[in-house]
Amino acid sequence: MGLRMRLFQLNQDKLDEIIENPEELFEIDYSEQQYNSIEIDKSWGGLKFMLSKIETSNPLKLSMLISSEQEIEGIDELTSDLYDVNFLTKEQVRELTTFLNKLTENNLKNNFDFKTMNENDVYGNPFDKTYFSYFAEYFEHLKKFYQTATKERKAVITFIS
């Protein structure tokens, strides 16, 4: 089975409500159209590793697309099924998508070092050179997801379950 990551889009007002009242997160039906969501399987660890190696001129790091480290406080008190529940505001989504749109599969591939990933115990290991296509596929899904979020002026919540 393993730990999988889900990302979903929501209006900034709804994110603000959830930050204020974390129990509101559990009232969301992710299958509804208003909450466009994707699951990026177990690729989240490797993608975060590779994105963290890419420099930008912005203080926001590309690895924040996976885990912003802006946690929604109190979730762990409400459930043990979710962890690493993070968010990006609609402004952060827009800024990060600007940099993400400039990246190609080759940019990602330049940071695919499966030996270092294994040595650093990146989630989902052990990896070998054949794993890059797996990460590249989810990278493309991630790009499309964030492009849509930016176009629709949405915030994003990510969590692992």
Image: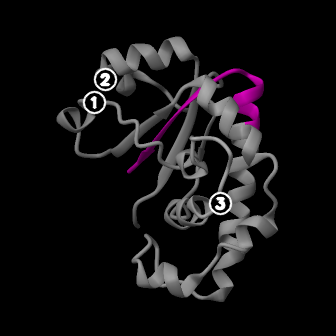
Q: Which residue is mark 3?
A: 54
Q: Which residue is mark 2?
A: 22
CB under 8 Å between callouts 1 and 2? Answer: yes
Amino acid found under the numbered disc labelled 1: Glu
Distance, label 1 to label 2, CA atoms, is: 7 Å
- The image shows residue 28 at horizontal and vertical percentages of 45, 24
| SS class, disc 3 | loop
| Residue interval drawn in magenta | 147-161
The residue that appears at 65% across and 56% down in the rendered structure is: 55
Within 10 angstroms of label 3, few (less than 14), some, or many (20 or more) residues? some
Within 10 angstroms of label 2, few (less than 14), some, or many (20 or more) residues? some
Quadrant of the rendered image containing residue 76: top left
Residues 160 and 96: in front is 96
Q: Quadrant of the N terminus?
A: bottom left
Distance, label 2 to label 3, CA atoms, is: 32 Å
With respect to residue 56, does 113 lie above or below?
A: below
> Which mark is on residue 73?
1
Answer with left or right where residue 112 lies relative to residue 120: right
Amino acid found under the numbered disc labelled 2: Pro
Q: Please tell me how many numbered marks the rendered image carries.
A: 3
| SS class, disc 1 | loop
Residues 56 and 120: in front is 56
Amino acid found under the numbered disc labelled 3: Ile
Residues 71 and 3: in front is 71
